[in-house]
Every structure is written in structure tokens, then in C-alpha cells.
Image (cartoon, rainbow, N blue to C red):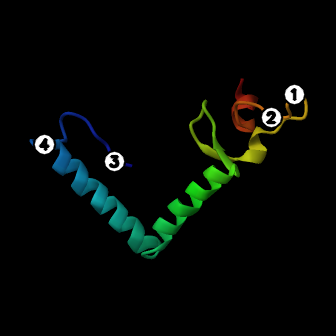
Amino acid sequence: MIRVNRFNLGSDPVETLSSRLYRMVRGMMKEKGSNSVLEGMSQMQKDLADGRIKKCPKCLKLKPINDFRNPNTKTGKTRYCSACRKRR
């Protein structure tokens, strides 16, 4: 997580954000191995394109397509994931 507000951006906001993102990604790569972050992002992109995962418009999380299935609806699918439907 990167916290951003007008007080901690400094005199050059673009440079500040760039350096923070670089440090964050570099740290993730050290933890998981150099290629695993990129491989994970690539796999997520493929899953979205293939329809295996979907973004819930309510919680804004990527969830497996099975979380959007509901046999009680006409189409068998719902707009929100199962966790968000339970919170209503």
C-alpha cells in the first residue's frame, strides 16, 4: 500500500510516486522471486480475458467466476459476488 496525500508528495509528485512504486515492486520481487510478480500479473490478465475471474462492482475485488453464479436467477449469474450478496 502506498499512502498518498498533498503533504507527503514533496515538490515533485511524479518523481515521489515513481520512486515509491519502484521500491514497492522491487520489494515484492525480492520476496517472491524476480519473475513471479510479472508471471502473476500475466496470469491474472489471461484469467480476466478468458472469463475465469471477474471484478465485483461492489467490493472491487477480483473473484473467481463461480462466485457470481446463482441458480435462483433467470440467467444463473448475478452482478455481485457471493460475499457481497450475503452482506445485503
Residue depicted at x 13% and y 42%: 10
Mark 2 — residue? 77
Mark 1 vs 4: CB contact within 8 A: no
Q: Nearer the viewer, mark 2 or mark 3?
A: 2
Mark 1 — residue? 73
Query: Residue 2, which numbered label?
Result: 3
Q: Nearer the viewer, mark 1 or mark 3?
A: 1
The amino acid pointed to by label 4 is Gly
The amino acid pointed to by label 3 is Ile
Horizontally, residue 5 falls left or right of residue 82, namely left
Query: Distance of mark 4 from mark 2, alpha carbons?
Result: 47 Å
Mark 2 vs 1: CB contact within 8 A: yes
Query: Distance of mark 2 from mark 3, alpha carbons?
Result: 35 Å
Residue 80: x and y in percent read: 70, 32
Query: Distance of mark 1 from mark 3, alpha carbons?
Result: 40 Å
Horizontally, residue 13 falls left or right of residue 65, namely left
Residue depicted at x 59% and y 34%: 59
Q: Residue 33: which quarter of the image?
A: bottom left
The amino acid pointed to by label 2 is Lys
Q: Residue 85: which quarter of the image?
A: top right
Mark 4 or 3, nearer chain start: 3
Q: Secondary structure at mark 3?
A: loop
Query: Residue 10, which numbered label?
Result: 4
Q: Secondary structure at mark 2?
A: loop
